[in-house]
């Protein structure tokens, strides 16, 4: 059985290795540009000197970006693990499947099946702040600022549910988006997609 958060933690480690590699190359590039002429007592042409420093700087910023991506991946993994902990409290008869690979959407975070055979897909998101909707689109409120979410989470959740329904030959699969860290202020489903917070998860399934 796949463990919640496992795939995204592996991705975080991959980002870290790539980031460390970029930083090592940056150090080597700058060291060669600055140190070798001093060590070997020759002068480097200004264009080559600037090129070496420029490449080193680009590699340094690439490594920094990869480490930031690793931190975000870790945050997502913690969210998945927190949701899994709640789902493990459901009564016997409930079945959970984590991180199923589905062609066209990547991983489906959770596929949940009730004892009566109802099925849900749960797309876990780790954004912070407060989630609201405006005309069917999700927005994030942080302080006094409101930001439109970059990706269309509603469309993605619907696609996940449809693909799982087709793969498993089910009559219907209900898509759910669960925010592991954010508050959610949405009164009803959006285009058939339920958007809830982690604190609402257990009660949402009526147990």
Image: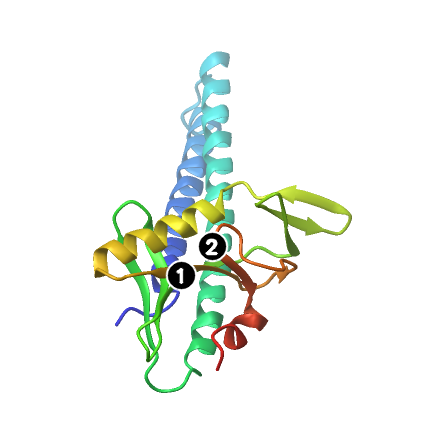
Q: Which is nearer the eye, 123 or 175?
A: 175
How many marks the image carries: the answer is: 2
Q: Are marks 1 and 2 in contact (CB under 8 Å)?
A: yes
Quadrant location, the N terminus: bottom left
Q: Residue furthest right?
A: 144
What element does badge 2 sit on? loop
Q: Which residue is located at x 42 percent, y 45 percent? A: 19
Examine the rendered structure and indicate whether residue 89 appears above or below residue 161: below
Left or right of 86 on screen, residue 141: right
**Residue 45 in view (yes/no):** no
Q: Which is nearer the eye, 21 or 7?
A: 7
Q: Position of residue 205 (x, y in %)?
A: 47, 74
Q: Which residue is located at x 61 percent, y 43 percent? A: 135
Q: Which is nearer the eye, 188 or 41?
A: 188
Examine the rendered structure and indicate whether residue 38 appears above or below residue 89: above
Q: Which is nearer the eye, 156 or 41?
A: 156
Q: Which residue is located at x 41 percent, y 40 percent? A: 22
What element does badge 1 sit on? strand
Q: Residues within 10 Å of mark 2 (few under 14, many from 20)?
A: few
Q: For mark 2, what is the residue?
A: 192
Q: For mark 1, what is the residue?
A: 174
């Amino acid at each position: 059985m796949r463990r919640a958060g496992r795939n995204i933690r592996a991705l975080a480690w991959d980002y870290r290795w790539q980031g460390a590699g970029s930083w090592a190359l940056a150090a080597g590039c700058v060291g060669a540009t600055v140190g070798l002429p001093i060590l070997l007592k020759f002068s480097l042409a200004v264009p080559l000197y600037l090129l070496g420093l420029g490449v080193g700087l680009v590699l340094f910023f690439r490594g920094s970006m990869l480490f930031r991506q690793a931190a975000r991946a870790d945050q997502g993994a913690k969210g998945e693990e927190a949701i899994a902990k709640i789902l493990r409290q459901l009564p016997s008869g409930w079945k959970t499947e984590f991180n199923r690979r589905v062609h066209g959407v990547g991983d489906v975070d959770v596929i949940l099946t009730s004892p009566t055979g109802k099925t849900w897909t749960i797309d876990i998101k780790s954004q912070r702040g407060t989630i609201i909707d405006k005309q069917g689109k999700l927005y994030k409120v942080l302080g006094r600022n409101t930001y439109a979410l970059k990706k269309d989470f509603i469309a993605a959740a619907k696609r996940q549910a449809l693909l799982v329904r087709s793969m498993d030959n089910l009559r219907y699969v209900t898509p759910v988006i669960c925010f592991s860290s954010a508050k959610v202020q949405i009164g009803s489903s959006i285009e058939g997609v339920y958007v809830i917070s982690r604190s609402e998860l257990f009660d949402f399934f009526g147990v």
